[in-house]
Image (cartoon, rainbow, N blue to C red):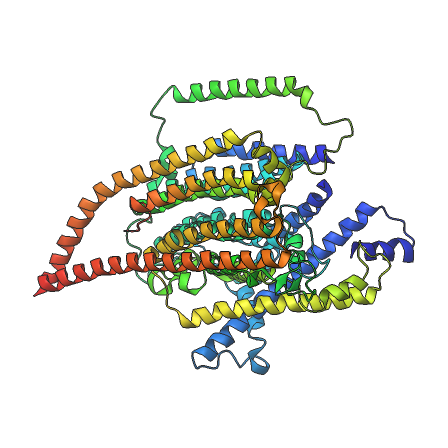
Amino acid sequence: MLANYAFIGIFFVAAVSFPLAPLVLAFLLRPKRPTPIKQSTYECGLEAMGDMRMQFKVQYYLYALAFVIFDIEVVLLYPWAVAFNQLGLYGFTAATVFLLMLFAGLVYEWRKGALEWV
Amino acid sequence: MDTLIFIITAAIALIGAVAMVVARNAIHSALFLLLNFGAVAVLFLLLYSPFLFAIQLTVYAGAIMVLFLFVVMLLGAERIEDAPDQIAWQRPLGIGLGVVLMLVAMATALRASAFAPPPGGEALATFGDPAALAALLFTHYLLPFQITGIILLVAVIGVVVLNQRGRHRSEEAGREDARTRRREDARR
Amino acid sequence: MYDMLYNLINVVFGFNWPTWLISLIGHAAVAAILFAVAPFQMLFLTYYERRAIARMQDRVGPNRVGPEGIFQPIADGVKMFTKEDIVPKAADRWVHLIAPCVVVAPTMFMFAVVPWGPGMVPVDLNVGLLFFFAISSISAVGLMMAGWASNNKFALLGAMRSVAQMVSYEIPAILSLLAIVMITGTLSIVSIIDAQAGLFINSVDLPGVPDWGLGWFIFTPVGFLAFFCFFIAALAEGERTPFDIPEADSEIVAGYMTEYSGMKFGLFYLAQYVLNFLLCGMTAIIFFGGWQGPGVNWLYSQAISPANPEGMWLFNVLAGVLGVFYFLAKTYFFFFVMIWIRGAYPRLRVDQLMDFGWKFLIPLTLVNMLSAAIWVGLTRWGAAEGLAFIEGWSAGVRWGVAFALTLIINLATYIMMARIYAASQAARSRLELEELRDLAAMSR
């Protein structure tokens, strides 16, 4: 079994080196004439105003939090889905309890307005 | 071969971890942490558990990494480290706790010879298989599984509470803001 | 394929190399071939998209470079290579450089588990599907790096938007696939394709169905709803048009790519098209049988394979060509659907996008999993699993009952969810209208 993953390793090495080849080639081919204007930060052709650090909506963070929670639940469901046929009604019941919790969480978030992008 | 891969990945994981602690910029720290997560995922593969490998990547390198980066970017906190430490005893305490953790890990590793792989060297063909994992998860470890569900539900409630607190504050401010802006616009 | 290589090296040339070395060479060759094919896919897809969208908008599209403009993508590639690479002074040079690599590398890595034809898969993992989505979630970090390292407001905004979007639509995508995994009982992509033999009815559900390679999951209510949800989520993951707010050019220039030029920009572009290709391919594989189609299974049964070592190599070639043809035809069709959607729909707002993912797709996929459970229970289970009452039913009756029941459940849920969702959207737009009226009253 580990042999399979050795080949995955080959693919990994190939995938990581894949973007390097065009970058190196482009490095050799392209002109290099930097000027201060070229290297200034783009902002619709005007001088950049203020800092990049602005206030972001806290919703981004809350969605990410919700995502982490749901992602973990989904990941726990993977093995269940694979073995569903063998587990029978017992496995179905056990996972239904789990899934109902997931669903309750979703409905709760919805009703409380945590999924609202205002 | 296995040992060689182990040494390389373990070294990468260690380098990532050390660089994460040392880096002055919080974003760089987060990226080194990503390197560390990736190396740890490969270590799971060496332990014959492809499922944990994939989970390590999805949950840690995918989800939790995004969360970290969001937090750092939301706070604009990547250069906070430039300031001197506010709490003087934080660093020695951290080092002390780290040493204790390492001792515990070493003690566990030394005592764990009972869990060495079977004499054949190769694990069972179904070992670490998602189906085999599910069979265990839904029989022997059903209670922990359901408790995980409850913990996650509590986490959802936490998200809702955070959201409500943020909403009350921003809503008042935001609504006033919008009103005044609109009035000004209207005057123009 | 490796057996053929083995024969060639050890029997024909008589080198007697060890097996691991031969499979190492084989895999390296496969990786090299695939990674040479991928950029050409991207070149072709850009041309295909530009011509198709031009047709829809009553234009001609690129038609000057070569016959019918066929060399346009190559000209673009040359331009990418020779353009100056501009890095803003304020940017973080190293992260700026690494970000496109972090986006491209996982995308290419995903090719490792994608089967192209019968017996033509680089590596058949038993957690293949999970691997695919685990790897794909890493490129979100690359986008974030790009946005942050550029030190530009638009870039950071675009990165935040795109990551929030990818993250929100990953859950419906995986949940809709879980319904299929429940039916097939495996995470191996090759086995999922193998499970789709039959003729409109899957031959696992109803033994004795003639095998035309058409037992696709799309023909079941569970598979159809899963396909619907998965394809929409794939549009969002690939940042295709109704969901392309991360690079909404009229609002935030080009999103996280704003400060990129030259080959680094080209790499982002490459990653995007290759990802779209892979997502279309995944849709074809999981819901439309991948390389399954009339004739492939018969051809492959005559060929050299682990099950049939005495086959003819000619049939290997024929089965491979036909299988790859079916796979690519389906994949390009879905890419065409993506272009079609781009030609037909306007861009969503952020709040609409988030609402759609969390309040419409996720509940729908959760119910679909219940339907999948019913499907498996009715078609496969008996007294041993705790369903004694269906023990005596024949396979045909079981299939019919399962089909009708899941169809009713899925249809009812879809209509209900659509109503709830429409009502919530209507309420929101009422609020917005009221605010607008307020504004109008004030200005008067």
From the viewer's perspective, tell me whether residue C293 is left or right of residue B27.
right
The number of callouts visible is 0
Residue C88 sits in which quadrant?
Answer: bottom left
From the viewer's perspective, tell me whether residue A55 is left or right of residue C310.
left
- Identify whether C70 is placed above or below C161: below
From the viewer's perspective, tell me whether residue B139 is left or right of residue C413.
right
Residue drawn 40% across the image and 54% down it: C357
Q: Residue furthest left?
A: C444
- Identify whether B74 is placed above or below C270: above
Q: Is residue C150 visible?
A: no
| Viewer-side residue, C108 vs C405 | C405
The quarter of the image holding the N terminus of chain C is: bottom right
| Viewer-side residue, C253 vs C202 | C202
Q: Position of residue B106 (x, y in %)?
A: 60, 19
Q: Is residue C73 visible?
A: yes
Q: Position of residue A80 (x, y in %)?
A: 56, 41
Residue drawn 45% across the image and 81% down it: C59
Residue drawn 57% across the image and 51% down it: C378
- Identify whether B134 is placed above or below C246: above
| Viewer-side residue, A92 vs C88 | A92
From the viewer's perspective, tell me whether residue A14 is left or right of residue B176.
right
Residue drawn 51% across the image and 37% down it: A94
| Viewer-side residue, C292 vs A116 | C292
- Identify whether C283 is placed above or below C146: below
The quarter of the image holding the C terminus of chain C is: bottom left
Residue C206 sits in which quadrant?
Answer: bottom right
Q: Position of residue C375 (x, y in %)?
A: 55, 52
